[in-house]
Amino acid sequence: MLNAERAPVTGKRVQLMATCLCDAFYDDVAAATVEVLEHLGVEVIFPEGQTCCGQPAFNGGDWVASRKVVRHTVKTFAGDEPVVVPSGSCAAMMFHGAVLEFENESDLPEVEALGRRTWELGDFIVNGLGVKTWPGKFAATVALHRACHTRGTGSIAAANLLLKSIVGVQVVEFGEVEQCCGFGGTFSVAFPNISTAMGALKLDHLRAAKPDILVSPDMSCMMHLTGLAAKEGQPIKAMHLAQVLRDALKAQ
Amino acid sequence: MRFQQFDQFAAELKADTRAAVYDGSKKGHEKRTKLLFDEYPDPNRLRHLAGEIKQHVIENLDTYLPAVEAKMKANGVQVHWAGTAEAANEAVLRIMRARGATKLVKAKTMVSEETELAAFLEKHGIEALETDLGEFIVQIDGDHPSHIVKPIIHKNRREIAQSFEREGLGAYNDDPATITQRARKFLRHKYLVADVGLTGANFVSAESGRMVLVTNEGNSRFCLAATKCHIAMIGIEKIVPRDYDLALFLNLLARSATAQELTVYTEFISGPKSPVQPDGPEVMHVIFVDNGRTEVLASTCREILRCIRCGACLNVCPVYRQASGHAYRSVYPGPVGAVLSPLLMGDKFPQKADLPKASSLCGACNEVCPVNIPIPDLLLRLRNRAKEENVPSPGTPPMGAWALLASQPLAWRASLLGGKLIDYVPTKLIPVPALQAWAAKRALPAWRGGEFRKWLKARRK
């Protein structure tokens, strides 16, 4: 469903879409993304005018509001460099969601063009740049969360490949890995009981597997799970894939 | 604070019921995955192929329906068309009255749930008995099915044993084999005295006019063998082009629905008793039912008409597992129901416009669907329709102000700095319901608005 055909990556320059969550809460994830890309010899451009991918309103059903934000995003990310996002969900919004809500709009081709250039970070590293192993060292047992909006993309296989190639990383499996964490954007606040019950189940499975760190290609799921765990008084340690890659480099 | 009625229902669900639904659906999903994905070659390609075939059918119903009618008539079947649920029920009643019949035994059919046929017939003095064990239990309890394939997934055997005791079917005994034997004994006699047997159909081949029925209990076969008249009530979307296609669909349906290679009984029904076909009922009627389907066909969600009612999307759905089928207040629960039920409401769409919101849009339903229905996309389309029709949606934050900020970079950056507020002011005092709904159950991360941009600027100096 979420597969988008993408042009092969030729140059070594990308535009970074930091995501609104990193802009507001998780600055270190965006910073790690920059450091990881620069380590690979990629020049990172950060379009200052960027805001949000438009997903909150798209999921909430307000497509008029969402299209307004997507149009702004299309304008902000003009050019032909790949757009790299440290979030499977925002990436999917660009190559799938936005295309859906623009299907009857005259500027659909511009939206589709941005979608074809947009990559989730791990997917970009492995399938865009062809990098298959990661240097450095990171001593931890990690569990990889399958962020739902990476279904049908190369992101999870890419993250797994990179994590397993790092010296010191042990990847553990856990129960019902394909099940959602319960976030779901506006769902989390309109259906709080179901949302948190789903999250609690995910936490149970994770705790049973006893990882040191939960790793995800998406901070929205992490915000939900760490927020839930903290509220219960039993915090869990979570990191974005980019942070693990960056920290592994530091230990080189 | 007002939340969705659906969410409240889930919160108040009895622990027993939730456990029964959760365990039943999880087991169903895991068995299906093993059978379909570990032991069957290239199931994803088959899912896509089946989806394309059904899409082709629903987009060409105008030619397939007359073709099926012609074939069935040639096979000796009397064909009726019903635009609405009422018309479908009336057609059954008319056939019964013309025969002077007062007793009907019925197999499980979802379309008759849609039209509430059994209740309608009872009201008109006709005994209409459910013979599928699950549906029989639902009927004696005055309950509603909560799952497309496993109607009593929400009940445990102790509750069923109590119902049997109450109905005079024997002293309390919650042994499943005993319960089944008692139902069997009770129903066996009913088949013999009934005049009419009613079934649905899982597929109808346009090539031959053949109906296909799958069951595991054999009750549909009794409905056909013991009665003189067979009525099949069939949704107009049930057609496949050729007999050959049945190989694909039967393989996918049994695996997806009940994790079986094939169901125990697979019946191919061509027509009534004839010189070349000495068994079966003397008279056969088929009632093709629209009941809102042509409206769905004209909508932007027509892909939902591909559905073959396997229930795999229910079993995998994390929201269904928490909420149970009754949370959907509809004949069709789960992800497929969240799309189909509001659509089948026609003008009364707003009454069920909350259902498409009861999803985290995780996409698991699309991954398991044997006809590859893009359910999350359809849920999103219906959310948009609800917004366009101004249907109130408790708990969904308004997006106007956010869209304004997110399309003006200067305002956005200012708000990144201003957001620091949430670190200092108790959440309860910030009049944003969405924030409060979040914070009631989840801690908020520390506000770091603008920090990344500062870091990057410093790095680039």
Image (cartoon, rainbow, N blue to C red):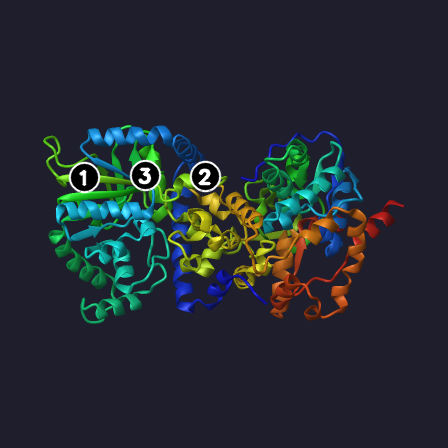
Could you tell me which secondary element the residue under label 1 belongs to? strand
Indicate which disc residue B250 carries.
3
First along the sequence among labels 1 and 3: 3
Question: In the image, residue B89 lies at what x, y percent?
Answer: 27, 48
Residue B51 falls in image quadrant: top left
Q: Is residue B264 visible?
A: no
Image position of A243 with respect to A107: above or below: below
Instruction: Tell us which disc is closer to us: 1 or 3.
Output: 1
Chain of the residue that carries numbered disc 2 in the rendered image: B
- Element class at badge 3: helix
Labels 2 and 1: the sequence-earlier one:
1
The CA distance from mark 2 to mark 1 is: 31 Å
Circle 1 packing at 10 Å, graded few (<14), some (14-19), many (20+), is: many
Mark 2 is surrounded, within 10 Å at the Cα level, by few (under 14), some (14 to 19) or many (20 or more) other residues, namely many
Image coordinates of residue B17 in percent, x first then y, are 39, 65
Amino acid at dot 3: Leu
Determine if residue A96 is in view: yes
Rounded to the nearest angstrom, the CA distance separating label 1 from label 3 is 24 Å
Label drawn at residue B284: 1
Of B283 and A171, which appears nearest the observer?
Answer: B283
Q: Residue at x 79, y 40 (%)?
A: A45
Lower position in the chain sequence, tag 3 or tag 2: 3
The secondary structure type at the circle numbered 2 is helix
Where B293 falls versus B362 (above or below)?
Answer: above
Q: Where residue A230 sits: x, y (%)? A: 64, 66
- Establish if B433 lies above or below B31: below
Chain to which the residue tagged by mark 1 belongs: B
Amino acid found under the numbered disc labelled 2:
Arg
Q: CA distance from mark 3 to mark 2?
A: 22 Å
Q: Residue at x 30, y 65 (%)?
A: B157
Q: Find disc 2 in the rendering and name its residue.
A: B302
**Location of residue A206 in the rendering, given as x and y in whole percent from the top left corner:** 56, 59
